[in-house]
Image: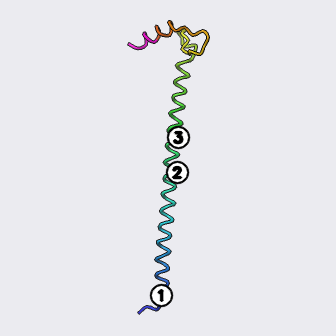
Amino acid sequence: MASSGVNVFRWSALAFGVFYGFSHQSAIYSSDKKAAAQHEWDRKVKLIDDAKAKYAEKSRPGSGDGVITNPEDPKFDLEKYLNKVSKESP
């Protein structure tokens, strides 16, 4: 038979192993969750930057045909803009 000291050591090792397993698993889970959140944030930032670039390109005043597409501009002409849009979209 094993002595009581050996049994205490075995149970202590088991308890330590279970505690280590839970703490290590939670650390892995939290780092994965943080990486996923960062990836999602980067994706959203990229989408916003792309949208801003497209809008800036679309509303650039010197688009070649002389039509101002920014409605905030005092020189904006709705009739010219609508004619341009009708030509672009079939």
State the separation of the CA atoms marked 2 and 3: 12 Å
Q: Secondary structure at mark 1?
A: helix
Q: Between disc 2 and disc 1, whose residue precedes?
A: 1
Amino acid type, callout 2: Lys
Determine which of the numbered discs, if any, sits on residue 6 in the image: 1
Q: Between disc 2 and disc 3, whose residue precedes?
A: 2
The residue lying at 50 percent from left, 33 percent from top is 47
Circle 3 Cα neighbour tier, 10 Å, few/some/many (<14 / 14–19 / ≥20): few
Amino acid type, callout 1: Val
The residue lying at 46 percent from left, 77 percent from top is 14
Q: Secondary structure at mark 2?
A: helix
| Up-down relation of residue 86 to residue 54 (above or below) | above
Residue 89 in the image: x percent, y percent?
Answer: 41, 14
Residue 17 in the image: x percent, y percent?
Answer: 48, 73
Residue 20 in the image: x percent, y percent?
Answer: 50, 69
Question: What span is in magenta?
Answer: 85-90
Q: Between disc 3 and disc 1, whose residue precedes?
A: 1
Amino acid type, callout 3: Asp
Circle 1 Cα neighbour tier, 10 Å, few/some/many (<14 / 14–19 / ≥20): few
The residue lying at 54 percent from left, 14 percent from top is 69
Is 34 one of the magenta-colored residues?
no
State the separation of the CA atoms marked 3 and 1: 54 Å
The residue lying at 43 percent from left, 13 percent from top is 88
Judged from this view, the residue extending furthest toward the right is 74
Residue 68 in the image: x percent, y percent?
Answer: 56, 12
Determine which residue is flagged by label 2.
Answer: 34
